[in-house]
Image: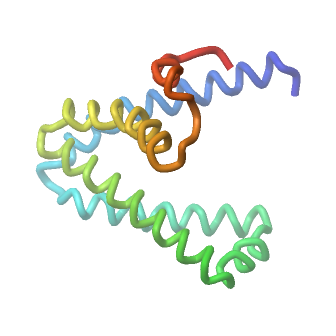
């Protein structure tokens, strides 16, 4: 692919993701009174597993997946990340169906900033102390 086509494809993918992300709270709100947030989360997990299994089988990558699943430390890491992602989505779905969309949106906005601070504190990574404000200011890549 050329740079222009990659740029266009990336832009369209980003617009699609942001559009879906913007419409999702409306969808959860519309079905919220009739369906439990935990049922929505369960449906999401089940259908994601089904689609992922189909993708792995169609792309013939099942040997790679089985190799990862045979390693207990990787399996534990995957289980921990799945639990964290499920908690994240469960709280988001609950927040939207409980009319807390603004609070959930602010949480998603603040989360990356908190991740930078945690990285600075616990891993001493990223910015030097005198350059700390630059960590929070967007800059071109």
Q: Where residue 58 appears, x then y in whole percent?
A: 74, 64
Residue 114 against residue 70 in the figure, above or below: above
Q: How many marks?
A: 0
Q: Quadrant of residue 35?
A: bottom left
Residue 106 placement, left or right of 78: left
User: Which residue is situated farthest in the right direction here?
Assistant: 2
Residue at the image point whose x is 64% and y is 15% from the top:
140
Residue at the image point whose x is 17% and y is 48% from the top:
32
Residue at the image point whose x is 12% and y is 45% from the top:
98
User: Which sits in the foreground, 124 or 100?
Assistant: 124
Q: Where residue 21 appears, x then y in whole percent?
A: 40, 34
User: Which sits in the foreground, 73 or 90?
Assistant: 73
Residue 71 placement, left or right of 139: right
Q: Quadrant of residue 61?
A: bottom right
* Position of the C terminus by quadrant: top right
User: Which sits in the foreground, 32 or 38?
Assistant: 38
Residue at the image point whose x is 62% and y is 74% from the top:
74
Residue 118 against residue 101 in the figure, above or below: below
Q: Quadrant of residue 114?
A: top left
Q: Where residue 49 appears, x then y in whole percent?
A: 52, 67
Q: Where residue 20 appears, x then y in whole percent?
A: 43, 34
Residue 139 against residue 112 in the figure, above or below: above
User: Which residue is situated farthest in the front direction here?
Assistant: 130
* Position of the N terminus by quadrant: top right
């Amino acid at each position: 692919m050329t740079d222009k086509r990659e740029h266009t494809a990336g832009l369209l993918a980003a617009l699609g993701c942001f559009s879906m992300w913007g419409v999702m709270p409306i969808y959860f709100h519309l079905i919220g009174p009739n369906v439990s947030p935990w049922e929505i989360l369960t449906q999401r997990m089940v259908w994601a597993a089904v689609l992922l299994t189909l993708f792995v089988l169609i792309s013939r990558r099942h040997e790679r997946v089985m190799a990862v699943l045979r390693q207990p430390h990787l399996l534990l890491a995957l289980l921990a990340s799945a639990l964290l992602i499920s908690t994240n989505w469960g709280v988001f779905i609950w927040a939207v169906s409980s009319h807390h969309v603004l609070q959930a949106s602010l949480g998603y906005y603040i989360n990356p900033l908190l991740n930078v601070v945690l990285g600075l504190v616990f891993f001493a990574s990223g910015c030097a102390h005198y350059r700390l404000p630059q960590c929070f200011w967007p800059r071109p890549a």
